Image (cartoon, grey):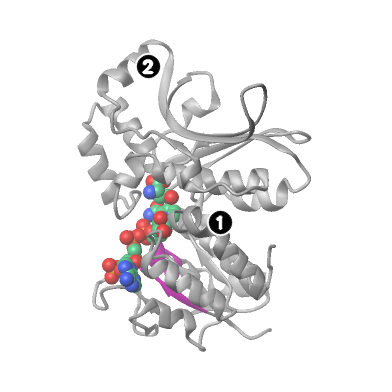
Amino acid sequence: MASPLKVGIAGLGTVGASVVRLIDEQRQQLALRTGRPIEVVAVSARSRNKDRGIDMKRLRWVADPVKLANDPGIDAFVELIGGEGGPARAAVTAALKAGKPVVTANKALLARHGIELAELAEKRGVALNFEAAAAGAIPIVKTLREGLAGNSVQRVYGILNGTCNYMLTRMEREKLSFDECLKEAQRLGYAEADPTADVDGLDAAAKAAIIASLAFHTRVGLDDVSVEGIREVTADDIREAHASGCELKLLAIAQRRDDEHAQGVSVRVHPALVPNDHPLASVHGAYNAVLVEAESAGRLMFYGQGAGGAPTASAVLSDVVAAAAHRVHG
Ligand code: NDP
Ligand code: HSE
């Protein structure tokens, strides 16, 4: 068997701790599937002594994530800190410059600096993988990059924020307040460290920018997306939606435009009334769904958990496996 892939993980919160756990649990199967063992050898987070429900004794602690990214003892760097700049951006840049493949779940970072990071990865000939950055456990990045590579995509739309969908579901079913639902989403690990990104639609917008860039082979950044979140949604709005045979959902919609008004790509996020007989109306809780309309393939729908430790870790791990197999995308 080939030598192990030695992984360094920066960020041991909801997602990072789940990734360490999953790699541990899947040790043997991963080695068989990839032809080489995958080992987490070093980690970084803010507080060294926090109980994370994982065995920290065998993991080398590197306080500075940039140092971890440059560490000669790791072959691949996994960034699960979050945030569009700061230590996440510095560490990902350092790892790519050092010629190490990077895996990240950080949509905020990619929607702002993805192009510059992708160019750096290409220059160094290493992978920058981000399956977990859009739609949680749903493999939409690989689907757009690989599965639909022979298609011309016309439209991609769906529910991309688990927190908002969870909140809207509970507000509707249990008549709970906005604040109660948000607290619960935070407790369950669905919300971002700063949950305004969720409720104001920016998290869904970042994911929509990433998906649109891949679907339409162009450069869409966060500032190109028109955004309205769910902060203004009231119990009355939800009741009225119901009375008119609809569900109220936060939708992300990316489509090609080629008409008398515009040419190019339009990307937007906003609350919308979804008729009860539409497939998106039955997507509840922290689930996400993505519909893709492609020229040859027709209409495809992907559905799965959009937030939470284990579902996100599953997507992160698929990228770590790709790094172990030396798969690199241009
Ligand atoms: P958490 O807030 O739970 O975890 C963040 C981790 O980063 C913590 O372990 C924290 O350390 C560490 N950290 C923060 N600042 C630093 C720093 N300066 N140096 C080193 N470590 C630092 O976030 P999540 O796990 O929820 O999210 C991580 C990433 O995954 C984000 O980009 C998020 O958008 C993305 N994501 C999250 C999903 C989810 O469902 N939660 C789903 C899909 C993507 P400490 O623990 O010591 O405070
Ligand atoms: N906060 C995000 C959400 C996490 O609720 O969808 C998954 O990207």
User: Mark 1, residues whose alpha carbon is within 10 Å: few (<14), some, or many (≥20)?
Assistant: many
Q: Is residue 11 magenta?
A: yes
What amino acid is found at the position of numbered circle 2 in the picture?
Ala
Q: Give the percent coordinates (x, y) of residue 18.
A: 41, 64
Q: Is residue 97 left or right of residue 186?
A: right
Question: Count of labels shown?
Answer: 2
Q: Is residue 265 magenta?
A: no
Q: In which of the image's four quarters is ligand 1 placed?
A: bottom left
Q: Which residue is mark 1?
A: 131
Crowding around mark 2 (Cα neighbors within 10 Å: few <14, some 14 to 19, many 20+) is: some
Q: Quadrant of residue 49?
A: bottom left
- The residue pinned by badge 2 equals 241
Q: In the picture, which quadrant includes the N terminus?
A: bottom right
Sequence-first tag of 1 and 2 = 1
Q: Position of residue 271 (x, y in %)?
A: 40, 28
Residue 306 in sight in this render: yes
Task: Quadrant for residue 82, please give it.
Answer: bottom left
Magenta span of residues: 7-21
Q: Position of residue 123 (x, y in %)?
A: 65, 72
Calculate the distance from the C-alpha at mark 1 to the C-alpha at mark 2. 33 Å
Q: Is residue 100 left or right of residue 41?
A: right
User: Where 197 sits versus 174, above or below?
Assistant: below
Residue at 68 percent across and 84 percent down: it is 2
Q: Give the answer, above or below, for where 318 lies relative to 76.
A: above
Identify the image quadrant of the C terminus: bottom right
Mark yes or no: residue 250 visible.
Answer: no
Residue 86, placed above or below residue 197: below
Identity, as a three-letter code, of the amino acid under mark 1: Glu
The spot of residue 111 in percent (x, y) is 49, 52
Q: Residue at 26%, 28% (x, y): give it.
A: 174
Name the disc covering residue 168, or none: none
Q: Nearer the viewer, residue 110 or 49?
A: 110
